[in-house]
Amino acid sequence: MPRPFAVIGFTVFFTIAVLYDTKTGVTAAVLAAFTVALVIALFSEKARNAKIIPAIAASGAIACVLLLTAEMFVYQPALSYDGKECEIKAVLTSECEERYGNYYYEAECITVDGEENGLKLRFTFSAPIEAEPYDLIEGRFRIFALGSTSDEFMLSHKSKGLFMGAYSFSEKFNVIQVPESEKPFAKKIIDFRGSLKDAVYRVFPDNRGALAVALILGDKSRIPDDVLDDFNEVGITHLICISGFHLSLWSFLILKIFRKTGMNEKLANAFAIVGVIGFMLVAGLSYSVLRSGIMMLVYLLANIISRQRDSLNSLGFALTAIAVFNPFAMGALGLQLSALATLGLILYFQFFGEKVKNAFGKTSPKPLGRLLYLVCEAILTTAAATAFILPVTLRMNNGFHFGIFLANPVAIPVSEACIVLGVIAAIVGLLPIYNFPAVLGRLFLDFLMLIADKTAELKFMSVKIYEETAFVVLTGLAVIVLVSLLLKHKGKAMPVLTCVLCAVYFVCSLTVSDYFSDRETRVNVLDCGNGMSVLIRSDGKNYLFGGGGTEFLGGMYLSDAVEFFGGELETVVLPDTSEFNSCWFTDIIKEHKPQNVYADELPDGTKYLLDSSEKHGFSDFRAEEDTHIFCREVNGSRYAVFENGDISILICFDPIDYSSVGADCDLIVSRNDYPQGIQNGDCRAVVISSDAQRGVILSDELSDKGIQSVFTGGNGNIIVRASNGALSIKREK
């Protein structure tokens, strides 16, 4: 078996990544299957001699054991503190992070209720506290499970090994400031990181500085939402997440500098190792940094001891090391994207790199051949990395932007220039001389933001895709690859044809999916608490009915829903200014700037925000081509009816009597109750926006009436798709 770590590492990685968000019973069943496969393989002489099958089975079993062990002995014991109020003494291990109007500090407990306990917590405060990293904090806090309102957040925190949060009701706690001399070396690293950020912000004091810090250190906290959205939309977020791209840049730059001085190659590699370790510490030991750092250290160490390097083995070794340290890390999106993209690049260079280089090496004149080679290689490496991260990105973004093939080849060299110029400008900024690198750096940073912005505006290159369609697309690609591997086994390898077929199938399937999905009506009942928020997409327009629930969840889910549906938020219907219907209306106006607002009255302080919106009364809706919308008030209760060729929807903002509506509907969306008097046959389905307990009761009552129903209840948005009379309902988690 020529690449043992590759086999072990990839098996562990993929096994845990697939099982990460499943029940422990599923993991136990998979463990049993791997164990049986291992026993069978060991009794088969042919399998034993091949070695790879026993290695895969053993690695899969070890991955399951690691995951079960972490679940039972680390995660579940931490969850036992959920909802408890405890006397806590802890040491703060991070700088303050400000988000959503709150201030967060990571910490490691020293004692909980007087007993020694190393529980890791994320403290939440309404105002910043007078504390620095590695100061102590003590007091009575309420502990809660992180991500309890969202599976996505829970899995994200879990992958980082941070399971629990804490807050204080009374704000009565003490901060014990520890002398600098008694703090660990990690505090000096945090201080250096802060000083570097301050130096960058001094020479780039605006959005450029936020982007420069993200490029250099991976800190995206101050990047404006619109800039970050552009990077996410186009698919070049990897540039502002520390990975192999950054470590390779710095290590090879160090090697080149020392080699220019005539230094011995092994000594230059030793200095590069020190530089890589230092950069890893300053950038923060995220899992993508660890993955790329371990691979780079293996590469440099191989140079020193004159051993042959193998990138697949290095990647497998890095993944194995991280999995042993924290099995949950295999579920981190950053690590998944980093590892899969790296795998794609390694395979590209192994199978195609030399062929592409030779093909352009014969082009005359040579400068033209060199230029064509660089352009072609940039596009092909983008395609290779993108192909391998598709299962993750399609799930994350519910779509794909073909503009990545335009932006990425240009953005990579530009971002390299931004990183180098940013560091040099920060150093020169400390001296009383003209800072030419800063002037040049501003131009490159502006150009990088322009690339992302202009590419994101190419909406025709962006396609949205539903989960079930994504499954079909990925299955088709897997079938093509498996057939190709089978043919290779029979001596008929066709890698180029396989890549062409995969590319054609991918483009055609996404284009067809986007074409048909854009011609259906889509309804998203946002799961943002006990309030009404319904987003409808019809004929290329987005309509929002209500803006109630929880402010944080509402704003986040609406942004995700609008991004998924595509286009802008054109119309908002606000029945009243109650908390149930308008608690985050101000955020809607600020972020999405709808063209039309239908409301009789507006929440305080929002009128001045409507300069770019047309104001109408609640009942002033007009028919638009094949779409008819009208809003009414009956006996103090307000409702809206939406009708087009696909579906008719009754949206009840208040409890109403169904007989007062006077219209038959396919779908009823209601807050905290269903219309009184409704009977089997009056509608095809009911969606209730409520908490879980209330939702279960109402759902049971509707089932007794023979009516299909579903409720939000903190379990995810409800997605309804309608086309030519066909209706489908699913829960988005």
Image: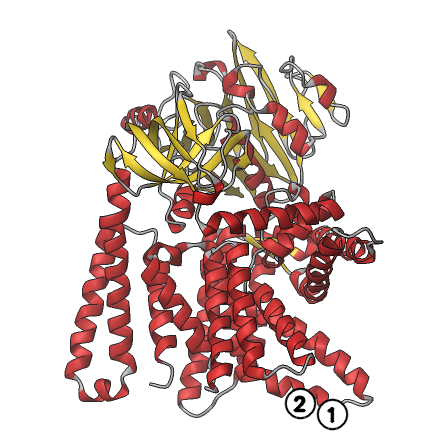
Rendering coords of residue 256 (x, y %): 66, 76
For residue 458, what is the image quadrant?
bottom right
Name which residue lies at 50% across and 51% down: 396
Badge 1 amino acid: Lys
Name which residue lies at 39% across and 72% down: 317
Q: How many marks?
A: 2
The quarter of the image holding the C terminus is top left
Q: Residue furthest toward the top?
A: 635
Name which residue lies at 48% across and 53% down: 395
The residue identified by callout 2 is 358
For residue 671, what is the image quadrant?
top left
Q: Identify the mark at residue 362; answer none if there is no mark.
A: 1
Q: Is residue 207 left or right of residue 694?
A: right
- Of residues 465 and 659, which is closer to you in this image? 465
Q: Identify the mark at residue 586; answer none if there is no mark.
A: none
Q: Is residue 276 left or right of residue 29?
A: right
